[in-house]
Image: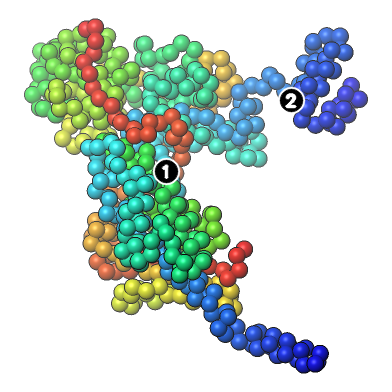
């Protein structure tokens, strides 16, 4: 064995594979060949070791802006950057991986900005280690085979609704009044929105919710939130999306749209969701690493601080992008990113 | 005869060492100074073209804005020609050789910045994208400086980007400029025993700049930075250039 080690050192890594194959013929069992190869270059490395040795973690994020989780990319003095709650979480993952890998060299999150639907393809094809895209971990039908969803990094997810015309709000509120104290959000929403044109985001929780629960509406499926807002024909009565996103955009981006609220003015939220980090199903070590990290961030109050920072504080996203944003790979982003369009759902 | 030759060489050496500003040494210095001036003009023209296209860049209704690197390049070439009579497509033989070497590098760096920003520029549904003269200028200057021994930097007395903080030399010049009426020439000086040129070209606020940098002072602008409370014609900052005599 000492002689073998000596030989391996002498040959170095160049040309070692042909050497080992030739050497293998002289050995009695395959196990010995495996051991010999492992001496030079461990074959069965787990995903965390692979991340450590590469010095980078490949993270997918969605190009569709889900403010304040991911803001549209902006130009800064440092180049093009993205920012938001999801991006800050990715930085935490990168920092934790740096510590895990010994802290000698930083583990850089390499962001792959791509369309939401392509995240699932990219991770399945092994181009991503994980993705963070405000994905609900408990939405029926949202999960994809072979994927794993972490413990929550955001608990207060849920579908909200925004409207432009006050008469839509009146219809829903009237239904709540008819219930005479027996609060049934789904029933009020079903009756209130009956016959109206409702927009939901393709493949997201709002789409799945509307498909399953809002049979008596004209459902319009949109590629992104801006495309829903921009659509003039047909006139959209209600847009369904994540409540936190709608709360942000009605305050700061599209002030002529308003959140649909209950009769007492409290937020009308149609579901309860939590957001998860997504990895491939078989990546157990990475999954434990992420769950332990999220638990630690929750326990220390750091996650709460992040949530407050992005959802409650008054700030300018551009400035945050400049100071703390992350660069990204643009190879998968269409050259002229189009927010897409809306079309009526088929088969209803 | 031999001793005469030695005496001649010795006297010549003494002459050249004693008077470094003689005719032979002035030519490259002049060349360097002109080159610095042309580089500052070119970076400023790039900033101007970005500013002229600002409405187009910030238009949320269209995706492909058509503000491609090639379109940008052509507009820069035309404007630079108008301002300096120098044709960047066909650099004149009268131009200093250093300028002929460096102007295409800066043009290429500027073009690459516009290419890098295409994704941001062509987003539909997003208005303000922070692709403004200042961010363009910072990136173009950095790209150029990374591939050249000449350093270009945008600087200001109170820069929004801390990487643009002035060094001691720049701070002194900026403070002097801030108290003077606007000038349209660069302030050039040879430092370190005449081995390095420092050139500072002042930039003044135009009307269009005041939406972000004007009054009321302290109110956050669209990008989230407090407004400077500036008025048209106030000193905004400067383009600072350092060129060593020896290419290191």
Subunit of label 2: A
Above or below: residue A274 compared with residue B241: above
Residue that mark 2 sits on: A41
Residue shown at the point (36%, 11%) measured from the top left: A140
Query: Which residue occupies the foreground of this view, B181 or A302?
Result: B181
Query: Which residue occupies the foreground of this view, A346 or A94?
Result: A346
Q: Is residue A256 left or right of residue B24?
A: left
Marks 2 and 1 sit apart, C-alpha to C-alpha, by 38 Å
Q: Residue furthest right?
A: A3
In this rendering, the count of numbered labels is 2
**Residue A151 appears anywhere in the view:** no
Q: Is residue A45 left or right of residue B130?
A: right
Q: In which quadrant is the N terminus of chain B drawn?
A: bottom right
**Residue A137 appears anywhere in the view:** yes
Residue that mark 1 sits on: B116
Above or below: residue B105 compared with residue A27: below
Label 1 secondary element: helix
């Amino acid at each position: 064995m000492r002689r073998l080690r000596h030989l391996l050192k002498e040959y170095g890594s160049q040309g070692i594979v042909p050497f080992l194959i030739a050497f293998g013929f002289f050995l009695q069992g395959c196990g010995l060949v495996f051991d010999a190869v492992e001496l030079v270059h461990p074959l069965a490395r787990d995903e965390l070791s692979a991340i450590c040795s590469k010095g980078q973690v490949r993270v997918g994020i969605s190009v569709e802006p889900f403010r304040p989780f991911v803001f549209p990319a902006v130009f800064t003095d440092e180049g093009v950057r993205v920012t938001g709650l999801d991006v800050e979480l990715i930085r935490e993952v990168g920092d934790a991986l740096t510590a895990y890998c010994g802290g000698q060299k930083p583990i850089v999150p390499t962001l792959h900005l791509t369309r939401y639907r392509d995240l699932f393809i990219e991770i399945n094809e092994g181009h991503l280690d994980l993705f963070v895209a405000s994905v609900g971990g408990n939405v029926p039908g949202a999960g994809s085979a072979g994927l794993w969803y972490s413990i929550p990094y955001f608990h207060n997810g849920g579908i909200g609704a925004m409207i432009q015309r006050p008469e839509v709000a009146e219809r829903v509120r009237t239904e709540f009044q008819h219930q005479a104290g027996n609060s049934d959000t789904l029933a009020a929403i079903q009756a209130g929105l009956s016959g109206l044109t409702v927009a939901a985001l393709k493949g997201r929780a709002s789409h799945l919710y509307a498909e399953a629960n809002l049979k008596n509406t004209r459902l319009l499926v949109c590629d992104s939130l801006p495309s829903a807002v921009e659509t003039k024909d047909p006139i959209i009565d209600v847009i369904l999306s994540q409540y936190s996103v709608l709360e942000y955009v009605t305050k700061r981006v599209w002030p002529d749209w308003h959140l649909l609220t209950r009769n007492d003015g409290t937020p009308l939220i149609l579901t309860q969701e939590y957001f998860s980090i997504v990895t491939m199903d078989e990546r157990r070590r990475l999954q434990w690493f992420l769950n332990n990290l999220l638990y630690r961030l929750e326990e220390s109050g750091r996650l709460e601080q992040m949530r407050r920072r992005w959802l409650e504080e008054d700030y300018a996203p551009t400035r945050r992008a400049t100071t703390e944003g992350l660069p990204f790979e643009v190879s998968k982003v269409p050259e002229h990113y189009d927010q897409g369009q809306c079309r009526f759902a088929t088969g209803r | 005869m031999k001793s005469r030759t030695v005496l001649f060489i010795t006297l010549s050496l003494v002459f050249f060492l004693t008077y470094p500003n003689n005719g032979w040494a002035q030519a490259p210095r002049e060349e360097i100074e002109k080159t610095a001036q042309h580089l500052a003009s070119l970076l400023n023209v790039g900033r101007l073209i970005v500013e002229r296209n600002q409405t187009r860049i910030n238009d949320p209704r269209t995706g492909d804005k058509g503000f491609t690197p090639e379109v940008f390049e052509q507009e820069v070439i035309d404007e630079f020609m108008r301002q300096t009579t120098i044709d960047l497509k066909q650099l004149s033989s009268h131009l200093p050789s250093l300028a002929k070497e460096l102007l295409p590098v800066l043009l290429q760096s500027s073009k690459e910045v516009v290419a890098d920003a295409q994704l941001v520029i062509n987003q539909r549904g997003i208005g303000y994208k922070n692709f403004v003269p200042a961010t363009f200028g910072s990136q173009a200057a950095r790209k150029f400086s990374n591939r050249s021994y000449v350093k270009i930097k945008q600087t200001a007395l109170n820069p929004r980007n801390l990487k643009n903080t002035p060094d001691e030399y720049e701070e002194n010049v900026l403070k002097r400029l801030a108290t003077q009426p606007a000038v349209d020439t660069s302030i050039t000086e040879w430092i370190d025993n005449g081995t390095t040129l420092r050139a500072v070209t002042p930039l003044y606020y135009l009307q269009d700049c005041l939406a972000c940098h004007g009054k009321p002072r302290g109110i956050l602008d669209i990008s989230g930075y407090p407004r400077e409370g500036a008025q048209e014609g106030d000193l905004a900052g400067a383009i600072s250039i350092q060129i060593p005599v020896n290419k290191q």
